[in-house]
Image (tube, rainbow, N blue to C red):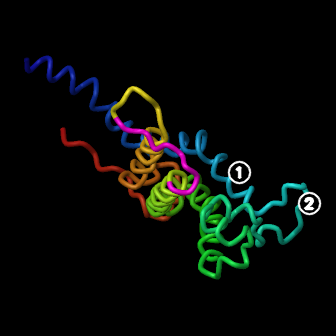
Amino acid sequence: MDRLLSLHHAIFAPVERLGDHLIPLLARLVFAATLLRYYWNSAGTKVWDRKGEEGLFDFFTLESGTYAQMFPKAFEAAGYNPAKLGFGYDIVAYAGTYAEWLLPLLIILGLFTRLAALGMIGFVVVQTFVDVTGHGAALGRLFDTGYGLIDERVLWIFGLGILVIRGAGAVSLDRVLGLNPAPRALAA
């Protein structure tokens, strides 16, 4: 049994050490491959005119559809007039829109990754709440045979959770700035 355990350790200890460096990097790459474009496109729909008439300051002007996406019931109650929603809605709309660009960018760069991933987790939770309560999306259930919104969002949060726990990894600005030190060596 000791020989088997020694063989197991000899094979998998290097794999585990390599994983300490690769897992955060792979989590960031998976985020880039699966969610980066999703969030950036979503933010783009909130600031760029659908007629293709993009101006210099469009980045600072929200389309009225932003309010329909983020506050569907309140926007309907306001007669689809953003001016009737109030300043608080504007602040949330701007913050949410720019978070859809900034937080993914920070994750990709590996800069303040833990904080950005934590922000994205909060964003996903709020987004899911709005999808269910405002847009009537079916949440679904975990541990059933179907695939629903909850299954998708739990996977997203899992990947982001890895970044909160492990940081950005070796290839990151966090490592350069000392915010994500190298993993400790495993005890022999």
Q: Position of residue 123 (x, y in %)?
A: 51, 59
Horizontally, is 145 left or right of 70 in the view?
left
Q: Which mark is residue 53?
A: 2
Q: Residues within 10 Å of mark 2 (few under 14, many from 20)?
A: few
Residue 130 appears in the rendering:
yes
Q: Who is closer to the viewer here, 20 or 36?
A: 36
Determine which residue is flagged by label 1.
41
Q: Position of residue 120 (x, y in %)?
A: 50, 57
Q: Secondary structure at mark 1?
A: helix
Instruction: State which region is magenta.
Output: 133-142
Q: Earlier in the sequence, mark 1 or mark 2?
A: 1
Q: Position of residue 13 (x, y in %)?
A: 27, 32
Residue farthest to the bottom, as pictured: 87
Query: Quarter of the image containing the N terminus?
Result: top left
Q: Who is closer to the viewer here, 36 or 151?
A: 151
Horizontally, is 117 left or right of 105 in the view?
left
Q: Secondary structure at mark 2?
A: loop
Horizontally, is 63 left or right of 157 in the view?
right
Q: Is residue 186 above or below residue 107?
A: above
Q: Residue at x 73, y 78 (%)?
A: 83
Inspect the image, locate mark 2, and give the three-letter code of the amino acid beneath it.
Answer: Glu
Q: Who is closer to the viewer here, 61 or 76?
A: 76
Q: Residue at x 38, y 38 (%)?
A: 141
Q: Does residue 137 show up magenta in the picture?
A: yes
Q: Residue at x 43, y 29 (%)?
A: 146
